[in-house]
Image (tube, rainbow, N blue to C red):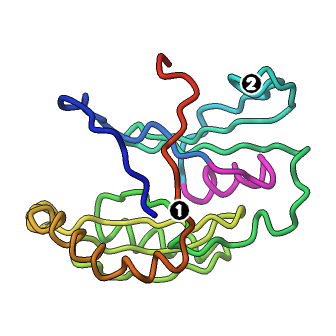
Amino acid sequence: MIRQYHPVAGKPPAVSSVHHLAFRCRDAEETRRFYEDVLGLELTAALALDEVSGTNAHERYMHLFFRMTGGDFVAFFDAPDHLDDPKQFDRKWGFDQHFAMAVDSREDLLAFQARIREAGVTCLGPLDHHFCQSIYFYDPNGVQVELTWRVPQHEAIMADEKAAARERIRAWSEETRERKAARLKPVGPLKVADKSA
C-alpha cells in the first residue's frame, strides 16, 4: 500500500531553502497585480517561452517569478492553450494544496490582513497554531495562500516537536493503516527514467 524506497547510504547534502514553488495561473497580468501590487512581492521574471523544458515540445507559454525578501520565489505558468478544464482554477482545499510565506512580526501580519481585505479579498485569521500565527486567503488562481508569523518561542516549540515526530508518525501509521488500505490502491516502486540524471 505505501511505497517503499531502497536504502540510501550516507547523509545527503543540505537543502538550504525553497528556490521556488510553481503553480498554474489563469492570466499573467491578473496574477502580477495580485502578487506584486497587493502582496508586494518583486516581479523578477516574465519569460515568454516556446518550448517546454526538457521535452522538445513546442508550446507558447509564460513563466512568471516573484521574489520574497528572503530570496525565495513563487512562480506561475500561464499556458493559454491548456485552459480546457473549467474546474482547473477552482479553489483547492488547503489540505490538498497551499503554501505559506513568512512575515517578520504580528504587526506585519495584521497589516497584510487589512491590505488584503482592502483589495476585496476574503482573509481569515489570524489563527494561533502555537508555534506560529497565520492568515489565509485565496489568490486569483484558486491557490490558498498563508502568511505566517513565527512566535518568539518558535524554535523551542519545534525542537520539542522534532523529538516526538518519529514516534507520532509510527503511532499514526498504526492507527490509520486499515482505513488507508480500504481507500488507497497499491503502489509499485518509484520509476526513475534515468538514474544518471
Q: Nearer the viewer, residue 60 or 42?
A: 60
- Residue 138 position, x and y percent, is 62, 70
Magenta residue check for 32 = yes
Three-letter amino acid code at disc 1?
A: Pro
Label for residue 196?
Answer: none
Q: Earlier in the sequence, mark 1 or mark 2?
A: 2
- The image shows residue 120 at horizontal and vertical percentages of 68, 76
- Name the secondary structure under disc 2: loop
- Residue 1 at x, y percent in the picture: 46, 64
Q: Residue at x 21, y 30 (%)?
A: 9
Magenta: predominant secondary structure element? helix
Most foreground residue, 152 or 186: 186
Residue 59: quadrant of the picture: top right
Residue 54 image offset from top left, x and y in percent:
68, 22
Q: Is residue 119 left or right of residue 125?
A: right
- Contact? badges 1 and 2 (CB < 8 Å): no
Judging by the rendered image, the residue that carries numbered circle 1 is 186
Q: Quadrant of residue 103?
A: bottom left
Residue type marked 2: Thr
Read off the residue under disc 2: 55
Of marks 1 and 2, the one in the foreground? 1
Residue 89 vs residue 106, the one in the foreground: 89
The CA distance from mark 1 to mark 2 is 29 Å
The magenta stretch spans which residues? Answer: 23-39
> Residue drawn at (61%, 49%), measured in percent from left and top?
36
